[in-house]
Image: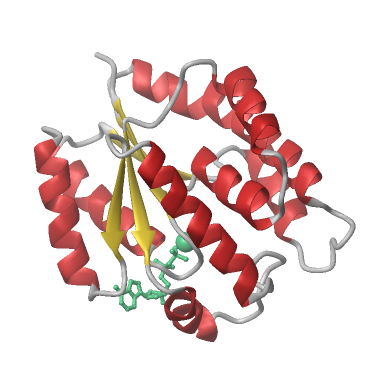
Amino acid sequence: MTGFFITFEGVEGVGKTTQAQKAFDLLDGKHPGKVIMTREPGGTSSGEAIRNIMLEAGNNGIDGMTEMLLVFAARRLHIRDVIEPSLKAGKIVLCDRFTDATFAYQGGGRGVDEKLIAQLQDMVQNTLRPDLTLLFDAPVETGLARIGERSKPDRLEAETISFFQRVRRSYLDLSQRYPERIRVIDAARGADEIADEIRTILRENGLC
Ligand SMILES: Nc1ncnc2c1ncn2[C@@H]1O[C@H](COP(=O)(O)OP(=O)(O)O)[C@@H](O)[C@H]1O
Ligand SMILES: [Mg+2]
């Protein structure tokens, strides 16, 4: 058994966590105990501590290169302790953000050279790549309006509209480069309609 690795990507508020939870419920119903839900940055206790360093408002000395290094440090632990063992056990792994987010946020958003990101990707992941990536795409204002009610913005949520527009652009560029892996989902629609499309995609992949 080799498992199946699905990642959920997109800017803040597009519905990644909402849809990952729905996909989890659907898949877990079909494959009880064989589906895990995790997230990045984070996914392990040390990884969550790294996430807090990255996202804590006020950590303004942290630049794009540092974010990239932090996120790959957390990713190494996450792969070693959670993702690879689960895939080896034949499980379906749902991950709320992964390396496309590093290309989009630290690369597109912060201007870190994507060749450096690609080098770390090879170093930390070896050949591991998602089998399927669901990219939730909507105008950045749509997502930001949805999370408007969330209490206090974290370091990344506090970024400017133009930052998120660069991130969105960069995600869409990735989807053109890897069309066989990355499925772009129109995230401006209602949650139920989006969930129906995802169910179809999961069915196409033989997962439900
Ligand atoms: N398709 C949708 N239409 C309207 N609101 C949505 C939709 N999907 C999620 N939401 C709401 O928008 C907010 C952000 O959704 P969330 O899933 O947390 O996004 P993300 O994880 O991408 O930041 C939540 O309050 C959620 O209930
Ligand atoms: Mg989320």
Taking the image as four quarters, which one is ligand 1 found in? bottom left
Q: Residue 177 is drawn in which quadrant?
A: top left
Residue at left offset 32%, top offset 18%:
89
| Residue 35, picture quadrant | top left
164 with respect to 193 (left or right): right
Rendered residue at 71%/59% (across/down): 55
174 vs 79, left or right, is: left
Question: For the view shown, which residue lies furthest in the right direction?
Answer: 61
Q: Quadrant of the C terminus?
A: top left
Residue closer to the observer: 27 or 170: 170
Q: Is residue 103 left or right of residue 131?
A: right
Answer above or below: position of 51 versus 154.
Answer: above
Q: In this rendering, does residue 93 appear at all?
A: yes
Residue 64 point in image, percent of width and height: 76, 49
Quarter in which the N terminus is drawn: top left
Residue drawn at (42%, 79%) of the image: 142
Coloring applied to the structure? secondary structure
> What is the number of callouts on the image?
0
Residue 80 against residue 44 in the figure, above or below = above
| Residue 41 visible in the snapshot | no
Residue 175 x, y percent position in the rendering? 38, 45
Residue 85: horizontal and vertical position, in percent? 43, 19
Q: Residue at x 25, y 31 (%)?
A: 34
When the figure is inspected, residue 160 is found, relative to residue 197, above or below; the finding is below
